Image (cartoon, rainbow, N blue to C red):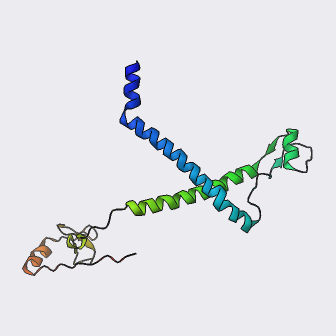
Amino acid sequence: MLSEFKEFAVRGNVIDMSIGVIIGTTFAKIVESLVDDIIMPPFSLMFGQVDFSNLYINLSNRRFDTFADAEEAGIPMLNYGTFLNHAVHFAIVAFVLFLFVRQINRIRRPQEDPLLNMKTKICPHCCQSIAYKATRCPHCTSDLEDVRAKIKHHPTYVRVQRKSPS
């Protein structure tokens, strides 16, 4: 049993998964700190108060002036302010994660194939770009066999375009 456990624990995907969990936990702390310590203070300044945790609905017949008094008395209440806090926090964290993932995808995205223009041709019927070896246009479904025979009699021109920096 000990050798089976050792084999399971040392297996590559278990180690990869544990590293992913550790990095994910650390990354979550970084994102949470970014939201709580950097993004939320300006929101609080712009909108007055962003902390809704003191908002509640009293479900008893007793009256309380503050949330702390009602909570101390232990009365039943709906704490919808806490829910609003978590919803706002989630929206901001989701947006920050979207920005992170967007930047990472921009870095990881493979560069456009420089020979793309040489691997495609224009359909003479619908003027859409199609694969060079296509015999039927996927856009207008026109048969391209006769067109390819005509093209063979004409010289082939290659157009090279430089990708503009963006």
For the C terminus, the quadrant is bottom left
x%, y% of residue 28? 56, 49
From this viewpoint, is residue 91 visible? no
Outermost residue, left side: 153
x%, y% of residue 116? 25, 70
x%, y% of residue 163? 32, 76
Q: Is residue 164 left or right of residue 76?
A: left
Which image quadrant is residue 162 in? bottom left
In the rendered image, the vertical position of residue 148 relative to residue 53, given as above or below:
below
In the rendered image, the vertical position of residue 18 relative to residue 58, given as above or below:
above
From this viewpoint, is residue 137 visible? yes
Q: Residue at x 82, y 40 (%)?
A: 76
Q: Is residue 101 left or right of residue 160?
A: right
Using the image as rendered, state which of residue 79 and residue 7 is in the foreground.
Answer: 7
For the N terminus, the quadrant is top left
In the rendered image, the vertical position of residue 113 relative to residue 88, given as above or below:
below
Count numbered badges in the picture. Answer: 0
Which image quadrant is residue 61 in? top right
Q: Residue at x 73, y 50 (%)?
A: 82
Outermost residue, top side: 1
Which image quadrant is residue 104 in? bottom left
x%, y% of residue 102? 47, 61
Q: Residue at x 41, y 63 (%)?
A: 106
Q: Is residue 84 left or right of residue 116?
A: right
